[in-house]
Image: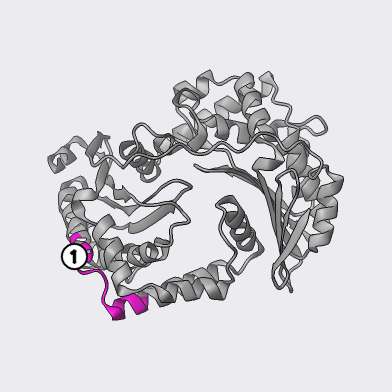
Amino acid sequence: MQTVKLDEGLYHTAAENGIIVLSEVLPGVRSVAVGIWVRRASAHEERSKMGVSHLLEHMVFKGTERRSGRDIALELEARGGALDAYTSRDHTSFQARVLDEDLPRALDVLTDLVRNPALRETDLVTERKVVLEEISQVEDTPDDLVFDLHAAALWPDHPYGFSILGTRETVGRLSTEDLRALHQAAYHPRHVVIAAAGSLSHDVLLKLLGKLGWFTFDAGPEPQPVAPVPPGARVVKHVPRDSAQSHIVIGTDTFPYTDPRRYALLLLTTVLGGGMSSRLFQRLREELGLAYAVNTFQSLYQRSGVAGVYLGTHPSTAAQAIEEVRREFERIAREGLSPEALREAAQQVKGQVTLSLETPVARMYRLATIAVYGEPYRTIDQMLAEIDRVTVDQVAEVAAEFFAPERQTVVWLGPDGSSSLV
């Protein structure tokens, strides 16, 4: 194993079998956040197997060779800790937050459910119903559903446009053989990043992981890359629904997570819709009263990304709201940001970044992201300095390319009367 000290109290270890372990000591806390990231998720799926990564994430909690599902649920909760998991487009993650004295227990539970899930047919029958209920919940939550619809419109033929949860049809067809095949192909050290932050020692963390076999576990095959992503489709799409609001996403494909332009994009989305003082909030909500919720977003992945704006408005004002968003996009694409606006946005973003890293969980996520996306480590001060180095010209280039109104994919979910927007 090769261990490198990246910063005071922050270490990176790479083992011969491919596993990466990172940790950061945070003085003054009594807890530890620890997680296992598997670099395989919905972006690696075939359309016919849509949702298999998410279903496997659920199924590992149903029991292992040593523990029942109830045992898994109780082992950390009984000590005041918490266990959680999620599936994203690029990776699947399993995390725990516990008292520092319970780190060995947390690692044992996480290792057991990640490496030794039972994947029983009887459990699949039950958990499939749970996932179908989760799909129904999203379908009943239009401000969530519209993002899935937008991704599908933007990337109709690429897994980045697939639903992470899958569909009723694909989930209904998935078998224990599908789950075992995914587990055998992906849940190996070469695919895995382990990150921890809080009251811990890196040497102790490595010893605990060694006792659990992580450094002698078979490396497994090379991680499967995400397929190349075609340019986003430029469409305007209406999905009819009987509802009191029209839920609208206006956005475009951008670039991968590691692209150096990401801070310029973040500054632009902050100015447009990053809070109550943003241009879109002030115009659409405060001045025109067209929306209760209006905000920008950006999600950057391994091979591409997406940025845009979400808003909910009455069907009768949907056309006006979209037109106002387009005007702001056109303005920022044409003008970029003034030096003063850029300085204000940089200060806002730096404050948000700093405040977001105040907890062990946030520090754990930061460490994992470094390894998952293959980034060089940067201190927080270096990150803040990168934000300060963004220039007016860099912002103008990103604005002109990604906020031109004709580049946007528009999807809205609402009553048929909104079809006049086409």
Give, as a single range, the part of the protein colored magenta.
Answer: 330-344
In the rendered structure, does residue 332 fall within the stretch colored magenta?
Answer: yes
| Amino acid under disc 1 | Arg
Magenta stretch prevailing secondary structure:
helix
Q: Which residue is mark 1?
A: 334
Q: Position of residue 151 (x, y in %)?
A: 36, 40
Asked whether residue 289 appears in the rendered view, the answer is no
- Tell which of 6 and 156 is nearer to you: 6
Residue at coordinates 66% horizontally, 63% vertically from top-left? 360
Q: Is residue 334 left or right of residue 169?
A: left
Q: Is residue 398 left or right of residue 416?
A: right
Dot 1 alpha-carbon crowd within 10 angstroms: few under 14, some 14 to 19, many 20 or more: some
Residue at coordinates 50% horizontally, 69% vertically from top-left? 353
Tally of marks: 1
Asked whether residue 406 appears in the rendered view, the answer is yes
Q: Position of residue 251 (x, y in %)?
A: 30, 50
